[in-house]
Every structure is written in C-alpha cells, then in structure tokens.
Amino acid sequence: MRLSQLRVLLAVADNAGFTAAAQQMGISQPTVSRAVAALESELGAALVTRRRDGVVLTEAGRLAVMHARAAVHHFDLIKAEVAAVTGEVAGDLRLASLPTATGTLVAARLRTFTDRYPHVRVRLMEGFDRDVRAWLENGAVELGVVTLPAPGFTTMELGSDEMVALLPPGHPLTHQTAIEIAALSKEPFILSTGGCRPLILHAAQQAGVELEAAYEAGGESAIEAMVASGLGVSIVPTLGRKDDQTIVTRPLNPRVTRTLALAHSGETPASPAAQAFLDMLAGDPARQGA
C-alpha cells in the first residue's frame, strides 16, 4: 500500500468519480483506476461502486477513506511542521469556497497569502454551501467559506452582502422600489437549496408569512434562468452577481443580509499553512471593517 494510492483514493472520494479525480491530480484516468484496483486487491474488498452519475463508496471504502485521510494528513504534516520549526511555512492549504465568494472575498486574500508564503501550495475546491460543510466535516479541506450561522464550526467573518428580490421583466412588483417578503409569498417562489435557504425561510417567518416553494434549485444561475423564463420569483444574495437585463432586482423591505465566514472544523489542530492563513485574516483591515 503506497501513499500515492491513498491520495488517489481520496481524490476519487472527494470528486465522486475517476475522471474528475484524474483531472485534479493531473494523471490519466486509467492510472486512477489501477491505483484503486490495487488497493481493493490488497485490502480484499471493493472500495467503490460505479454508477452512471459517478461512484459511491462502499462501507469498506468509507472506512478506508477515513484512515487514508488521517494517514495522508499526518504524512503531510511532517514536512510542514518541521519547516515551521525553522520559521518557514510550507505544505498544503486545503480550502473550499462558494463560487460567488471566490472572486470577491477569497482570491485577493490568497494572492496576499501566497506572496507572503511562497512555499505553500493552495488547493481550492468550490461547491455549494452543503458541499463545503461536508468537506470540512470529512476532512477533505481544513478551511471553508460558509454562510452563517454555522453551528459546530469555529468561524471568522469575511463579509456581508444584501439579499434582493428577483422578478421577471414586466412583473407587477417591478413598479415598487423595495419588495416586502409578504408580497413575494403570494407568488410562485423558486427556493434555493443552498446555504441561503435557512436565511430566506427565517426572513419569511419573521414577516409572518410562508413562501410557496413552487420550485427548488441549487445554483444561482439556475434560479436566475428560471425567474427570467417567468416560472416565479426568488431571493438571492448580491455577492458576485452580474448585471442581467433578463431579470429585475429590487431590495427587500425590511433589509435582509447574509454573512459569510471562514470555517474550521476544530476537531484537529490547524496545519501550519491553515493557521498562517487564519492569522493573516485576523489582521486583515478589510475583514475587520466588514
């Protein structure tokens, strides 16, 4: 059993597929398949089940991944912590982000970090809020951008943005300068399945209404396309949104804001790279003023 095989297994588990794992690692798909097959042969058990939409771990696979993640993590810490003793921060920074937050809240900070710590390799994963939380819980990443509240995680606020109403062009509510959630509750509503969902439902509860969830969608691009086609109305965050002439946005009344934070599971001590990133953010004037 080789460390390289364990890394391949983790990539397959984190990407739910052989092709995506190969792309992440920069190797061929047959190489990934052979590595997993070799592990299965040595362990005497099937580790993954292949499906049309990707692969899922077997019970043996979940157990193997748990131990493989711990083994790889501790191996990577050897070089990183020895380097830290000499005053050099090295190793991997395993970070996850929401697509809308990467360019607006994360990228510039990563540039500052890599300029300061050139020996750290950044591994960035992107996904929905639920994906980021799952990666934090299973140890695929050490740090992740999530929507607050985030019970069970140690968090550091990064910034806030405003939630706005999305309306199809020509909708009667577009004549209003600000939209009450009570008005949206009378319309077919497209409800997010992502991290903003609890925030939206809480705002509706505070307004004393219940939203008619005629449709549900995960990504903001899907929600915007559904609104543009006239299927219903919705509420989305402003962070990372681009001007779109096919839909109309209006502020909410009363205002509803979303706060994003960098989360750490806290179950294991942060690696030198992750701790250095946290320390850098703690002294970031932009974060303190957010």
Image (cartoon, rainbow, N blue to C red):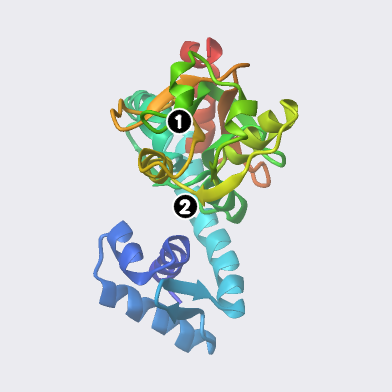
| Residue type beneath disc 2 | Asp
Task: Please state if 118 lies on the left or on the right of 61 as rendered.
Answer: left
Seen at 44% across and 45% down, the residue is 231
- On screen, 205 above or below 232? above
Q: Quarter of the image holding residue 202?
A: top right
Seen at 46% across and 64% down, the residue is 10
Task: Please state if 156 lies on the left or on the right of 82 as rendered.
Answer: right
User: Disc 2 on helix, strand or loop?
Assistant: helix
Query: Is 246 in front, or is 76?
Result: 246
Disc 1 to disc 2, how far (Cα)?
A: 46 Å
* Residue 251: image location, x then y, percent: 50, 18
- Residue 89 visible in rendering: yes
- On screen, 124 above or below 4? above
Q: Give the residue at mark 2.
A: 76
Crowding near pointer 1: few (<14 within 10 Å), some, many (20+)? many
| Residue type beneath disc 1 | Leu
Q: Give the residue at mark 1.
A: 166
- On screen, 207 above or below 265? above
Q: Quarter of the image holding residue 39?
A: bottom left
Seen at 49% across and 36% down, the residue is 233
Mark on residue 211?
Answer: none
* Residue 230: image location, x then y, percent: 40, 41
* Residue 186: image location, x then y, percent: 61, 35
- Residue 113 visible in rendering: no
Crowding near pointer 2: few (<14 within 10 Å), some, many (20+)? some
Contact (Cβ within 8 Å) of mark 1 with mark 2: no
Q: Of label 1 and label 2, which has the lower sequence position?
A: 2
User: Disc 1 on helix, strand or loop?
Assistant: strand
* Residue 217: image location, x then y, percent: 49, 49
Query: Is 31 in front, or is 125?
Result: 125
Seen at 51% across and 54% down, the residue is 140
